[in-house]
Amino acid sequence: MAIQPATSERRERATRKRLFTRTELERMEDAGIFHPDERIELIGGELFLKELPLKSPHATTISLCEAALRNVVKESCFIRSQLPLTLSERDEPIPDIAVVPGSIRDYEKHHPSTALLVVEVGGTTLRFDRQVKASLYAWADIPEYWIVNLVEGVVEVYREPAPMCRTPYGFGYLKTEIYRAGDQIVPLSLPDTSPIPVENLLPTSEG
């Protein structure tokens, strides 16, 4: 019997991805499907294993960023480290640092749905952080996004989210600035605070 050629519908069905929701992810976590030490990010309905800061430079950088931001955040917001942001039913990333509005007890029953500032530490994930996560955070109207780039030893600062073609979520940031050691950064949402020296955010360079 002759094999029937695949129709466009069959081809689409064959390549279609199984997308998940936050509710499904929570059920899988409650059922113990994942290892207790695994952190799962939900991005566009897909499940991604969050890179844990097993390497010392990554872990150190997260701690440095948290300490630097604690010196400048106001009482009207606070810092969450490696905890989820619920941006949509199919998007729940786990940023390394998020400065969110309100107080700790405001989120006893649900994760924050927005942030004033998100920080990711980029090493092996640098491309994903620049492309997918930058587009996601811009789509969620997060006004400022930092990537602490461990590869080049700089901090990439993204501001002014806006619609942008050819990006994963159809949004991106209009302004991108690179800050190096010797420079200082003032968070957009905290304009009256003291500037943060870039070297306070970066691990000590080798050599």
Image (cartoon, rainbow, N blue to C red):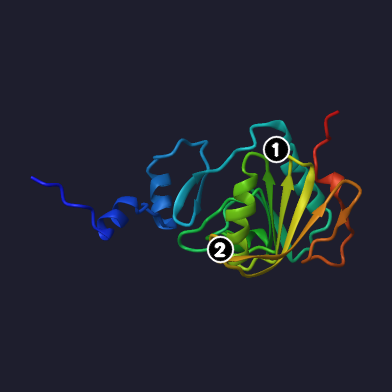
- Locate residue 174 relative to residue 24 in the image: left or right: right
Secondary element at tag 1: helix
> Is residue 168 or residue 20 the one in the foreground?
168
Quarter of the rendering containing residue 77: bottom right
Q: Position of residue 197 (x, y in %)?
A: 88, 50
What residue do we see at 39% from left, 46% from top? 28
Counting other residues with Cα less than 10 Å from the Cα at mark 1, is it few (<14), some (14-19), or many (20 or more)? many
What residue do we see at 8% from left, 45% from top? 1
Q: Which residue is mark 1?
A: 58
What residue do we see at 81% from left, 49% from top? 68
Q: Which residue is mark 2?
A: 166
- Locate residue 80 relative to residue 28 in the image: left or right: right
Q: Position of residue 52 (x, y in %)?
A: 60, 38
- Locate residue 1 relative to residue 22 in the image: left or right: left
Q: Amino acid at mark 1?
A: His
> Is residue 171 or residue 67 the one in the foreground?
171
Location of the C terminus (image quadrant): top right
Secondary element at tag 2: loop
Quarter of the rendering containing residue 152: top right
What residue do we see at 83% from left, 30% from top? 206
Q: Residue furthest bottom?
A: 163
Sequence order check, earlier mark of 1 and 2:
1
